[in-house]
Image: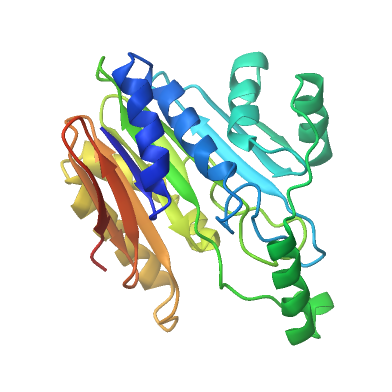
Amino acid sequence: MVVSTWDFGMAANQVAMDRLKDGASAMDAVEAGVRVSEADPRITSVGKGGFPDAEGDVTLDACIMDHQARCGAVAALENTLHPISVARAVMERTPHIFLVGQKAVDFARRLGFPKEDLLTHEARAAWKEWRKGNPRWRDFSTDISNHDTIGMLAIDARGNLSGACTTSGWAFKVPGRVGDSPIIGAGLFVDNEVGAATATGTGEEVIRISGAFLIVELMRNGYSPLQACQEAVRRVRKNNPNRKDLFVGFLALNKQGEFGAWATKSGFEYAVTSLTEHRLETSGY
């Protein structure tokens, strides 16, 4: 089973499922799957083509976690196409979990990840247009128009879980901002005895409730994936009673292959792929 956020998860899921059918681990599958989105310049919230920060720099965040609670993460990574693979390298090649900024870039170069300009013509044009309409951008003024992370969760043929989460973050964000996506326990969490969860949307609100960890712990205590996602949304709403346009979405998968999703408002789509089906679902809210 593979589940992932948004309609672009359909293509990512297909690659992940092909890997699972070939006997790959869930870890290999989720890495291969989200790399599809990272390399697609049409996706303006992930990887190449992702919208830049307020100064015009594309910075990428990602994390990955396997069934043994091994995990790796990178944040504020520039000029490197596949942050998910760099995050995995952090997990496998170092005693650490999280590398950030220029030192994360240096680490990637030492391992042979090539330098690549991630700012596409379309993203540059959108950034210039945003700057024209936001004369106060130097005063840390921004908006929340684009923050659609891809988070992917999978179970392999051995019954093991893994997850991956990767994004270019909040469009036109304050330089240096890092959201929930690379934070283990916020944007992603995996417990092989219970299940896994991931998040998308306004990452600051996911961090405030440790969203992915919360959902997994709720499932440990008997909640279904859907019920756990609903409770996480309830807590986000409790913290933000007057923010009607706030968007946060959660997606969960338990050890038995049951899945569920819920969001603060309508429009959250997620992809579901198994040996017998491949479809796009719309969550409740």
Q: Quadrant of residue 22?
A: top left
Q: Nearer the viewer, residue 150 or 40?
A: 40
Indicate left or right for 239 with 177 as reference: left
Query: Along the line of sight, which residue is nearer the eye, 45 or 198?
Result: 45
Tell me which residue sits at (42%, 71%) in the image.
239
Q: Is residue 235 visible?
A: yes
Q: Nearer the viewer, residue 52 or 142?
A: 52
Instruction: Say if residue 186 shows up in the picture.
Output: no
What residue is drawn where x is 33% and y is 59%?
269
x, y percent for residue 60 = 67, 46
Q: Is residue 267 left or right of residue 34?
A: left
Work out which quarter of the rendered image holds the C terminus and state it.
bottom left
Above or below 220: residue 119: below
Name the side, left or right, on which 62 lies relative to 194: right
Where residue 257 sits, quadrant-wise, is top left
The colour style of the image is rainbow
Q: Quadrant of residue 255?
A: top left
- The N terminus: image quadrant: top left
Q: Residue at x 43, y 75 (%)?
A: 240
Does residue 38 lie above or below 92 as drawn?
below
Q: Residue 280, percent across and down?
A: 27, 53
Residue 134 drawn at (x, y percent): 75, 84
Number of numbered discs: 0
Q: Residue at x 62, y 76 (%)?
A: 143
Residue 120: x, y in percent? 72, 56
